[in-house]
Amino acid sequence: MAAPNYQTSDFVDTLQALMPRGLAWPRDSSSVMTQVVEGLAPTWTRHTQANNYLLVDAFPATSVDLLPEWEAALNLPDPCAGASPTLQGRQNQVVTRLVNSGGQSAPYYIGYAGTLGYNVTVTEFTPFRVGQQAMGAQLGTQDWAYAWQLNAPPVTITYFSIGHACMGQALASWGNAVLECELREVQPAHTILNFAY
């Protein structure tokens, strides 16, 4: 069922229909009573539209007016996003932190970066073992068992998107600062994470 979309005329008609009958309650358009009701009706129309938009704004992926509340609950925005993060970037960070269920697998980190808007791959390393690696393989110590690498494009470009951007926002933004920051927050504490661009 769609949310009701009342117009100013609907409020004027309804209020006039609810007024008592008689000479003290005129309904013609030139009367002071009608002019007062017509002056107040746009406020009720704006409230109705805001209430209808609340259904959309309550969902973090499309939130604009309630985005600061979502960010406050998740300790965002963080300094990694820069001085003026994009609306889409802020929404992505909120959604990513909300849907984060935890994990330590390569697909988990690829999906986590994808929710943030980055296309990445993961390289896992193993210590060198004679007879198990091919000639020319990297020589690594036991510490290689705890190292992994996130491979991303040198520059990730986020383009202005209708519905996910706001007035005054740049038509494109680029950088991987949010990716690095967010993944450093969720990487297992005993591992060494390297970024390759």
Image (tube, helix red, strand yellow):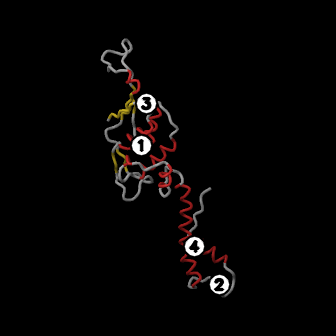
Residue farthest along the bottom direction in this orientation: 23
Q: Position of residue 112 (x, y in %)?
A: 45, 38
Q: Is residue 78 above or below residue 190?
A: below
Q: Which residue is mark 1?
A: 117
Q: Specify which label sits upstream in the sequence, 4 or 3.
A: 4
Query: Can you tell which of label 1 and label 3 is closer to the viewer?
Result: 3
Horizontally, residue 158 falls left or right of residue 63, namely left
Q: Is residue 94 above or below residue 29?
A: above
How many C-alpha atoms fall within 10 Å of the one at disc 2: few (<14), some, or many (≥20)?
A: some
Q: Which residue is mark 2?
A: 25
The residue nearer to you, when weighing 51 against 176, is 176
Q: Specify which label sits upstream in the sequence, 2 or 1.
A: 2
- The amino acid sitting under disc 4 is Ser
- The amino acid sitting under disc 1 is Gly
Rendered image quadrant of residue 125: top left
Q: Which residue is mark 3?
A: 190
Q: How far, Cα to Cα, is label 1 from label 4?
A: 44 Å
Q: How far, Cα to Cα, is label 2 from label 4?
A: 18 Å
Query: Can you tell which of label 2 and label 3 is closer to the viewer?
Result: 3
Q: Specify which label sits upstream in the sequence, 1 or 3.
A: 1
Query: Mark 2: which secondary structure?
Result: loop
The residue nearer to you, when weighing 157 against 149, is 149
